[in-house]
RNA sequence: GUGAGAUUAGCUCAGCUGGUUAGAGCACUGGUUUGUGGUGCCGGGGGUCGCGGGUUCGAAUCCCGUAUCUCACCCCA
């Protein structure tokens, strides 16, 4: 038997229902905020992700579904959504049009990882990207929007926030931090590795010994330039006014290189170790970096499988008709009656000749509201017997 | 890439220290005397015990390998 590849899942009932339920309602919410639908290819040139996500990131370093296509082109299945959207944005010269542009998208992403709870090789994200707005009020607005989405689906979360600085303040800080790490002995293996890949990550180390060593280390919060600090404060004030609870997490470092300034994650204790249900931040330099005209931008993505884990589908009511024949002679009349009823909505027909009891069972199992049957009597009188399975009422309807 | 646990009917699982026809619940299906469901009662179908080797008179059970799933590290949505 051929099975799906490791870490790849079929979306079957009832997840399919949940998926549509999530997409429909989330799309509605983000459209209220001015985001419009956009779709970009799943396959892109590998260089796009190397340049945007960053060569030092784990995603590019070891998790990409990368291969050479028949035209000898180095291509790769997208590991995240932002890079493709930015590429499209620049390619369509929207960076030259000026103004503010807001897009949302959803679809499959691919990362070659070991699967675990909340982590698949093919997974789905719903994301939004806002271009052309540098005001931190937009950051706040997006965070408020995500809260609206999570609240709509009634999921638990806490919001974690950090500012990652910008090209003015981050590089000098990083140098200072690396210098500190190099002059201090005794860090664990992971931290030594992080020193060259993503030094800020060392603050996140679970090793208590490393934490003690880090006490005298320089902190990014103290190193932010004036603009970064003031923007961050505006964001925090706006969130407070909107009564959005948050916790500052100075160790929150996004794994993608393109982030600057605002970084945030919505985490939930209802998930496993992979507890981020949504994450994002500002990436003011990325458009420029992908050969566009400098355009500030901010975006986020929701992990659809992760949020679906926490969504309860509202109870569906009985719906539509179930049609069944009691005698072979009734089959033709029933088939025509079923087709006619379909003009008014959902109809499921059983082609089996069964007892009334068996058909009622069938209608019940099919979750139909009405059970419609033709037997000897109905055939003679040219009628259709219909029972409402909820109200438990019956009626005879004339057949035409 | 590293580590741990799991894999027996469509689903959830039982099967003790290897012993004769591998079980249960749910689901499916039929009947329950004359045309009434979701909620009674009785019956029925369905499994080469993940796959490949090995030990043994004999393996679902023990050993080795392999695949997949699950969880965690790492990292992230």
Image (tube, coloured by chain):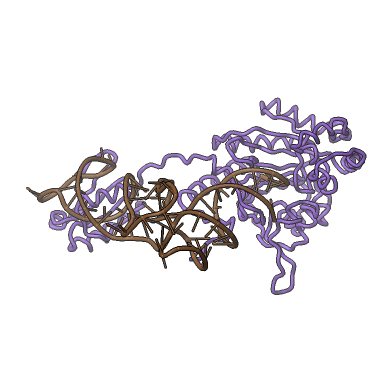
- Residue A242: name its quadrant: top right
Q: Residue A33 location in percent, x, y?
A: 65, 40
According to the rendering, which colour does chain A have?
A: purple
Residue A195 vs residue A270: left or right? Answer: right
For the C terminus of chain A, the image quarter is: bottom left
Residue A125 vs residue A352: left or right? Answer: right
The chain coloured brown in the image: B
Residue A76 vs residue A352: left or right? Answer: right
- Residue A213: name its quadrant: top right
Q: Residue A199 location in percent, x, y?
A: 83, 43
Is residue A388 visible in this depiction of the protein? no
Q: Is residue B8 above or below residue A267?
A: below
The front one of A116 and B43 is B43
Q: Residue A395 location in percent, x, y?
A: 20, 45
- Residue A229: name its quadrant: top right
The front one of A30 and A272 is A272
Q: Residue A54 location in percent, x, y?
A: 79, 53
Residue at 76%, 42% (x, y): give it.
Answer: A282
């Amino acid at each position: 038997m051929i099975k799906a590849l490791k870490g790849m899942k079929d979306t079957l009932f009832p997840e399919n229902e949940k998926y549509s339920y999530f997409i429909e309602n989330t799309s509605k919410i983000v459209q209220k905020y001015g985001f419009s639908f956009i779709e970009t290819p799943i396959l892109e040139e590998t260089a796009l992700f190397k340049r945007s996500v960053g060569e030092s990131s784990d995603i590019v370093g070891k998790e990409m579904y990368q291969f050479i296509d028949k035209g000898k082109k180095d291509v790769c299945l997208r590991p995240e959504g932002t890079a493709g959207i930015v590429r499209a944005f620049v390619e369509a010269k929207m960076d030259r049009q000026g103004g503010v542009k807001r897009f949302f998208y959803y679809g499959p992403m691919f990362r070659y990882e070991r699967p675990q709870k909340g982590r698949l090789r093919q997974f789905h994200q719903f994301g939004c990207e806002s271009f052309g707005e540098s005001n931190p009020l937009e950051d706040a607005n997006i965070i408020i929007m995500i809260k609206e989405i999570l609240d709509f689906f009634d999921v638990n979360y806490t919001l974690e926030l950090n500012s990652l600085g910008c090209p003015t303040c981050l590089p000098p800080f990083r140098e200072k931090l690396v210098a500190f790490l190099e002059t201090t002995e005794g860090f664990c293996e992971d931290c030594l590795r992080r020193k060259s890949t993503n030094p800020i990550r060392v603050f996140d180390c679970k090793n208590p010994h490393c934490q003690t060593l880090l006490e005298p280390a320089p902190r990014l919060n103290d190193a932010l330039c004036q603009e970064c600090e003031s923007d961050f404060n505006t964001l925090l004030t706006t969130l407070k006014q909107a009564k959005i609870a948050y916790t500052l997490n100075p160790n929150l470092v996004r794994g993608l290189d393109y982030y600057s300034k605002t970084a945030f994650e919505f985490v939930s204790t209802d998930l496993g170790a992979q507890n981020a249900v949504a994450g994002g931040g500002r990436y003011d330099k990325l458009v420029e970096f992908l050969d566009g005209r400098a355009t500030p931008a901010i975006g986020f993505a929701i992990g659809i499988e992760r949020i679906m884990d926490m969504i309860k589908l509202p109870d569906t009511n009985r719906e539509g008709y179930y049609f069944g024949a009691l005698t072979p002679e009734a089959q033709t009349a029933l088939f025509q009656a079923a087709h006619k009823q379909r003009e008014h909505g959902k109809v499921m027909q059983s082609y089996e000749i069964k007892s009334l009891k068996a058909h009622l069972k069938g209608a019940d199992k099919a979750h139909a509201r009405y059970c419609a049957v033709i037997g000897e009597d109905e055939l003679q009188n040219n009628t259709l017997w219909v029972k409402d399975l909820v109200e438990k009422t019956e009626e005879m309807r004339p057949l035409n």
